[in-house]
Amino acid sequence: MRQKIKRCPECGSTNLYHDKERGEIICRDCGFVIDDKMVDFGQDWRDFDDDSQSDRRAGAPMTYTQFDQGLGTDIGRRSDLSMLKGKNRDKYFRLRKWQYRISTALERNLKLALSELKRVSSFLKIPKSVEEEAARIYRLAVQKGLVRGRSMESVVAGSLYAACRRHEVPRTLDEISEASGIEKKEIGRTYRFITRELDIKILPSNPVDYIARFSSALKLKPETQSYAMKILEKAQDIELTSGRGPTGIAAAALYVSSLIHGEKRTQREVADVAGVTEVTIRNRYKELLTKLKLDKEVKKIKSRK
C-alpha cells in the first residue's frame, strides 16, 4: 500500500491539497504535483438518476468462493451478440474462447475445487460464512502446495470440516464423507494435515452443539432436549466428557433424557442419527447413569410402566 505523503519533497511544505477527482496530491505553496496516481479505496458508488440520490449501487463484495474473488470480468454471453455481425461476431467468439483457455493452473484448480465446495455445502446446508471460511482455507492450502499428492475432493472436504469446527457448526465426519464421497479416514487425515501446516487453532467440539440437531432428527420434545443439555453440563463439571467422542456422549445424554421423559427411543435409532455404534451409546449411557447417579430416576420411570 502506498505510504501517506505528509510533506512536499520539493519545498518541504506540509500545505498539501488532495484532488480526489483527478487523483492528484499537489503542494499549495510551490504547485509541485507530488502524486498523480492516487487510488480510491472507497466504495464504487454510481448515480443512475441525476435528479435523485437514492438510486445508487456499489460493486459486488469480494468473496473467496469464486476463483477470482469476484473481481474478474467475463466477456458477454451469446445474448449480447444481437448487434454484432460478420467479422466482429467471429472476433467476439475468439476472444471469449481464449479467455477460458488462457488461465493459470491455480485458477483452473480453484474453478473445479470451489464448484465442488459449493455442491457439498449446499448438500449439508452449510451457512455462507462457513463456506467462505472453507474457501479461504482451501486457497491457502493450494498456495502452499498442500494439494500435491492428494485428491482435490479430499482437501475440499478437509477444509470444509475445519471451517465447521472453527465456526462451531456441528457437522460430523460421517456427514461430510457421505456428501463428498470421500472416505472418513481420508478426510480426517487431510483435515489434520491442513490444520497443522496452516497453523489453524481449533478447539475441541462441544457435545452440546449436537443436541439440537439430534433432538430434531429424533422428534423429541423441547423438555427432553433441555434436560439432555443439563445432563451434559453436569457431565462436563466432573470432566466425564473429556477423552470421549462428542457425538457419542451427546447421543447418550439424549437417550437418557428420552427415557426419563417417557419418549423412549431405541439405542439403534439414536445411534443411526448420531452416526455412532450401539455399543458406544450403551457404554456412554452406563457411564452417565453411574457417575451422575441418574439410575434412580430411570428406575422410577420403568417401575411406573
Image (cartoon, grey):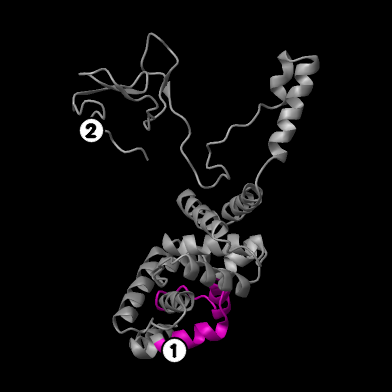
How far is mark 2 from mark 1, CA to CA?
72 Å
Of badges 2 and 1, the one in the foreground is 2
Callout 2 secondary element: loop
Q: Residues within 10 Å of mark 2 (few under 14, many from 20)?
A: few
The numbered mark at residue 286 is 1
Residue 163's spot in the image, x, y percent? Answer: 48, 60
* Residue that numbered label 2 is attached to: 6
Residue 256 in the figure: left or right of residue 265: left
Q: Considering the whole magenta stretch, tell me its main secondary structure.
A: helix
Camera sees residue 299: no
Callout 1 secondary element: helix
Residue in the foreground of this view, choosing between 89 and 238: 89
Residue at position x 47%, y 54% in the image: 133
Stretch in magenta:
260-287
The numbered mark at residue 186 is none
Residue at position x 54%, y 78% in the image: 266
Residue 127 in the figure: left or right of residue 236: right
Establish if 276 lies above or below 221.
below
Establish if 43 lies above or below 270.
above
Furthest residue toward top: 51
Residue 259 in the figure: left or right of residue 107: left
